[in-house]
Image (cartoon, helix red, strand yellow):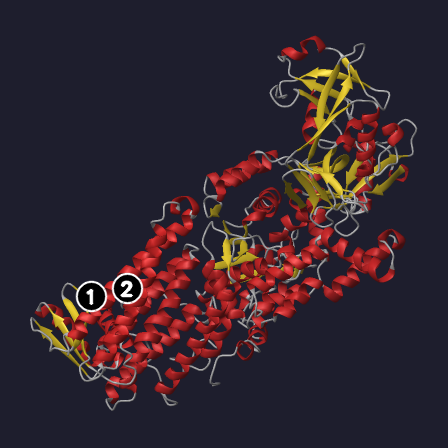
Amino acid sequence: MPDSYSPRYVEAAWYDWWVESGFFKPEYVAAKNGEAEKFVMVIPPPNVTGTLHLGHALTNAVEDTITRWHRMNGEVTLWNPGCDHAGIATQVVVEKKLFRERGITRHDLGRENFLKEVWKWKEEKGDKIYHQLRRLGGSMDWDRACFTMDPKLCRAVVEAFVRLHERKLIYRSVRLVNWCCTLNSAISDIEVDKKEIDGRTFLPVPGYKDKVEFGVLVSFAYPVEESDERLIVATTRVETMLGDTAVAIHPEDERYKHLHGKFVKHPFVDRRLPIICDDFVDMNFGTGAVKITPAHDHNDHDVGKKHDLPFITIMDDKGNLTENCGEFAGMKRFHARKAVLEALRKKELYVDTIDNPMVVPMCSRTKDIIEPLLKPQWYVNMKDMSAKAIEDVCEGRLTLIPEMHKKTWYRWLEDARDWCISRQLWWGHQIPAYFVTVDDPLIPEGLDTDDHYWVSGRTEMEAKQKASERFNVSPDKISLKQDEDVLDTWFSSSLFPFSIFGWPDQTPDLEAYYPGTLLETGHDILFFWVARMVVMGNTLIGKLPFTEVYLHAMVRDAHGRKMSKSLGNVVDPLDVICGISLEGLHQRLLETNLDEKELVKAKNGQKADYPHGIPECGTDALRFALVAYTSQGRDINLDVLRVQGYRFFCNKLWNVTKFALSGLGEKFTPNPTHELCDNESLMDKWILSRLSEAVAVATNGFEKYDFQSATTAIYNFWLYDLCDWYVESLKPVLYGSDEETKSVSQNTLYTCLDAGLRLLHPFMPFVTEELYQRLARRNCDDAPSICVSPYPLIEEFQFQNADLEADVSFMQNVVKSIRSIRADYNLTKMKADVFLKCTDEETGNVLRPYVDLIAHLSSSQTINILVNQQPPIGCAMLTLSVKCETHLMLKGLIDINKEISKLKGKQEKLNSQLRKLHENMVKSDYEIKVPEEVRKQNSEKASEMEVEIEKLTKGVEMLLTMQ
């Protein structure tokens, strides 16, 4: 066994052995335990483009910890891995690669050849995330790994679309969508970053050389028809006035009652805009008049529908102005912003521009500014499905943990708009819907926006047959054109819990592993993924996909900031596992697309947080830190350097196990059971009581998803109970000559190591496996690996003894008090006599059984129990309680005059510092000039100094009595 713990050494080979041995497959436990309970969980499929960040690491650590615990409890356990095709993200990556390397776009290649390039990229790069998940120790059944573009999953997607379309739950409609002009596609709400700005701000926009102005409110006037009057309106997007089709006022606004039924004239196009009355207008905001652009604003869209206004599209897919814009037609949208403003000035219709705090919607992939555009898209009718999902939570069929997420669940689903599922991309599941044209003059040609002229089908032949029946013509007169759009990535992901098992076929896996047990993920995708899996499971199979949802919090940096490349605080988990220099961290930044200013800021952030880089910590330490930080409902502020503390913990495990193996000896054979033999020492019984407590707290923590309690209990057992106290107490026994006592304690030590490693294994799989394999086995049929060994059960460890623990705690306080006095007087090598002054016989009787142990643990010469007696002169004293004092003989061991001189020197120094502090605190302007926080710190500092001076005074007085 190597002298010290090395993560690289420990983590080198175990994972491949686990996989090759089939330990992660549900069939392994099923073959051993037969009809055991099942635990089934699917991974939130990471993007195929992805590389791990700390958010992935947290998800993986928590999920693997849960999975390993269930497997160790003998359940038939399946954690199913998978990867998402990530439509937009992947297409963007491959497009950038093509342009960077070959100077071509996807349009130069054409759809078929472009998709070949995507598949080529996926085969070369797409399994990187799997490699990283393995490095984190994820105990997934890799034979069942699925990709959302695998044929099996593609078939499920087509089947789901067709069934929902046939049931009228999917339909086609023209509505406003989040449009990214760079992608030329609609995107989902989760792919929109909402950038908050305080006022006038210039932002870079793809396709524009100069930055574009945002964060201002422009006011301009519309001339009232047949009048000299003007109606002033305001907007943050002045170019959209080209699509205005009305001006709205409140019907009760006295200022404008004379304008009811009137019109204003558009200054740039031949258009009359009605002045409409609607009580949505806030009379007290601005001028009380609101421009209405139904085709380019979500709120205005609803007003337009209500008042039957024209919907005029002024922007094409690329963000260029259309022919509806008169003299501005063909301009790029933000060039038009400047041009329209200048034209308003020339016509003397411009009023003013003021700062306006606002939220700018940006595409998370391209950083382009999102435009609301009217587009024909496919939608899922969410009304009834959402109501069922709400009912599932209300009635307890589906449990959300922590409970606070229920409110979000209800709010989102109650307000859920129909789900737009079409995307104008090439990479993804092409929508299995076909536009029908009929070779018959009696039937008008269909309209792209009319659902009646669209059919869906599992194959084109099936779709043609449907069209033939719908229009009552023979199939040979039908022409079909498949929709070129693809489905939203969340659509295929929503089917993941059953598509991976071969649905719609009734496969053995589907029967065995659907529905699952638990879904664990981040709370940020509660609606986008979790809710959609629930509605799809209910609708397509009639069963919830899982019965529990555990939502972990987000990982932030040590300062509570969101992880951001521009701050330089995004850390690759592999850099924590393997370690990295500050220069290496800087190099990581060069691989991003940060501009020079952001790059400097990010480098400075890294230099401040990691001046010496990040030390090698290993997988076990990182996992333990992430899970130990997990507290339900709160974000995790992770100081990466604190992970190193858990690496030291691994080293402690290593050293104590190495010592224990030496103490057990090569020929040691543990007793067949860990039951008591009645010959255990008080410390044997005490450590078994502490072990029982750790088992109970850890098990309760797992059952309640309270990982903080579980990790704390296990950590404290190993570090404090076992290493600091029990092992130290064993040394005289193991090196002594009483073989019977030694044998009993060896078995107790073995029980603690064996059970302690199994307690810890779900959190720290590698180091626990390494150490477990070095232990002897109780029985020849024990598990070949710790990952399939039984987790310690509460009913097996019923050794709690509260009275004994109280006595040992008292003994430990005595030892700490002796150590404290020894440290104060620097007694590193000399042993002193100790006198424990007790006020009653009962207190003395508690300590007497531990006299030899106290002497050993505190490096004392003798321990003397005094009941109602005075200790000899020349002792230093510490009060333990009202019933006990510790007196340590110093006379003859120290130079008393030298010690008095040293204490007085400290006194004088502290008194001088305290005087200066008090002088500052009593100055007349102290309360005004000194910040409150500093004043508070000064008060605390003064109090601490006074306590220390008092302590030194008593020390001098005590030493004077020894002269």
Please, is residue 562 above or below residue 957 in the view?
above
**Which residue carries the number 2 mark?**
948
Residue located 45% across and 82% down the image: 774
Q: Which of the two residues, 232 or 936, is positioned nearer the viewer here?
A: 936
Q: Amino acid at mark 2?
A: Glu
In the image, residue 444 sits, relative to residue 405, either above or below, namely: above
Left or right of 463 in this view: 504:
left
Q: How many marks?
A: 2
Q: Quadrant of the C terminus?
A: bottom left
* Dot 2 alpha-carbon crowd within 10 angstroms: few under 14, some 14 to 19, many 20 or more: some
Q: At which x and y percent is residue 440?
A: 91, 31
Residue 698: which quarter of the image?
bottom left
Under circle 1, the secondary element is helix
Residue 798 visible in the picture = no
Please provide percent x and percent y for residue 365: 71, 50
Instruction: Indicate which disc, 2 or 1, sits on the residue closer to the N terminus.
Output: 1
Which circle, 2 or 1, is nearer the viewer?
Answer: 2
Q: Does residue 2 lie above or below 188 as drawn?
A: below
Residue 685 higher or lower than 165, as above or below: below
**In the picture provided, is 491 more to the left or to the right than 728?**
right
Instruction: Report whether 934 appears left or right of 565.
Output: left
Counting from the top left corner in percent of width and height, residue 633 is at 47, 49
Q: Residue drawn at (65%, 18%), measured in percent from left and top? A: 278
Crowding at label 1, few (<14), some or many (≥20) Cα neighbours within 10 Å? few
Q: Amino acid at mark 1?
A: Asp
Q: Position of residue 465 (x, y in %)?
A: 81, 40
Q: Considering the numbered disc 2 on the image, is that residue within a helix, a strand or a loop?
A: helix
Residue occupied by mark 1: 803
- Farthest-out residue, top: 258
**Does any portion of residue 413 appear in the rendered image?**
yes
Q: Relative to residue 479, is residue 415 drawn left or right? A: left
